[in-house]
Each structure stands twice: as structure tokens, then as C-alpha cells.
Amino acid sequence: MGVAELFLIGVGLSMDAFAVAVCKGLAMPKMRWRQAAVIALFFGGFQALMPILGWALGRQFEMYITSVDHWIAFALLVSIGGKMIWDTFHEESAEDLQEKFSLKELLVLAIATSIDAMAVGITFAFLRVEIVSAAILIGCTTCILSLIGVCVGRQFGDRFQSRATLAGGIILCLIGLKILLEHLGVLG
């Protein structure tokens, strides 16, 4: 898997964190760079950690499922992407996410927005992706996009939240389809 694909996966995975960061930015009466940096580091850190955990789990079961790994990758990415697309049209209001800043809440949000990254990590184990560089790229992408999300939320409101989640879901579904088509020999 190339750097461009890993970057796109990072972008797709970071859309939940971006959307929550937008909401956090909405809740800020003025731009607080320190809080924005903490939000970005929490989200980026967990998006980097979870694929490694998923990869470790996937390596444990590799010998049992290598013959169907492309189907698993396709199913995981499409289900994650499909859920993101579903959430775009059935999400909670931005007010529900606008609570005051607390590290405990941020920890829960970081874990919740990175669960899908663990599933992608399982997929990476089957595809023999070099996990450290992939995790770093995903984490850095999420960190940067989360910081941007806080700024966007602070400046422009929540009109971009749905579009970001929808775009992330579509990207993950397309990457899952590409993996499946490559393993079936349809794409070279």
C-alpha cells in the first residue's frame, strides 16, 4: 500500500475526529490555541495507537484468514465508511457535542473516534502494511486535521461537519473496493 493510499485512509479515518473538533471549536467563545493543541494531540495520538493495536490483533490470527483477507479488508472499510455515511444523515446535533472542555471527556471522544482505526489496523496486518509508518502518517494527518477542525468550528460554524464525515466515509468505501478489486485481479 502506497503513501497516497495511506494518506487517504488517514484523511478518511480522521473525519470523525475532525467533526468533533469542529464542534469543540464551536463551543469556544474565543480561540484557545492550547486547548486546540490538546484536542489535536489526543485525536492524533489515538488514531496512531489504534491501528497498531488492531495490527497486533490481526497478526495473531493471520494464519487462519489469509485466504479471505481481501474480503475482510473490503468488509471492514466499507462498513466503517458506510457507518460514517449513515451518521452524516442521522447524526446528533452539534449542541450535543458542545460540552465544556475536560480531559476525561476528550479521552472518551478520542477513543470513540478512533475505534475504526483499530479495524483498519487489523486490515493492515492482512495486507502486510508497515504499521509504524502507517500509524505515524494516520496520527499526524488526524492531528493536523483536528487542529484545522477546531479553527473551522471557531470561525465558520457547523455547516462543514456533515460534509467532512460524508467525504471520509466515501473515501474509506472506495479504498475498500479498490483493495477487493486488486485482489480479485480486476485492477492491476
Image (tube, grey):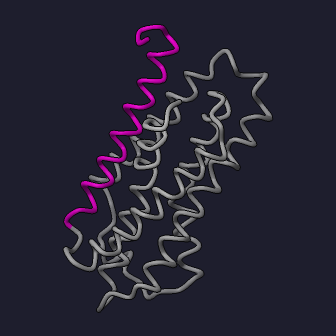
Q: Position of residue 20 (x, y in %)?
A: 39, 68
Residue at the extreme bottom? 29
Q: Is residue 178 magenta?
A: yes
Q: Position of residue 154 (x, y in %)?
A: 27, 79
Q: Main secondary structure of the magenta part?
A: helix
Give whichever of 97, 31 is nearer the camera: 31
Side (left or right) of 9 relative to 48: left
In the rendered view of the protein, which quadrant contains the C terminus?
top left
Q: Is residue 45 above or below residue 131?
A: below
Q: Is residue 57 magenta?
A: no
Residue 111, by quadrant, is bottom right
Side (left or right) of 65 relative to 51: right
Side (left or right) of 66 relative to 16: right
Q: Position of residue 28 (x, y in %)?
A: 33, 87
Look at 41% across and 58% down and name the residue there.
Answer: 16
Look at 41% across and 25% down and name the residue there.
Answer: 177
Give the magenta part as a residue range.
Answer: 159-188
Residue 144, by quadrant, is bottom left
Look at 28% across and 62% down and name the residue there.
Answer: 161
Give whichever of 43, 144 is nearer the camera: 144
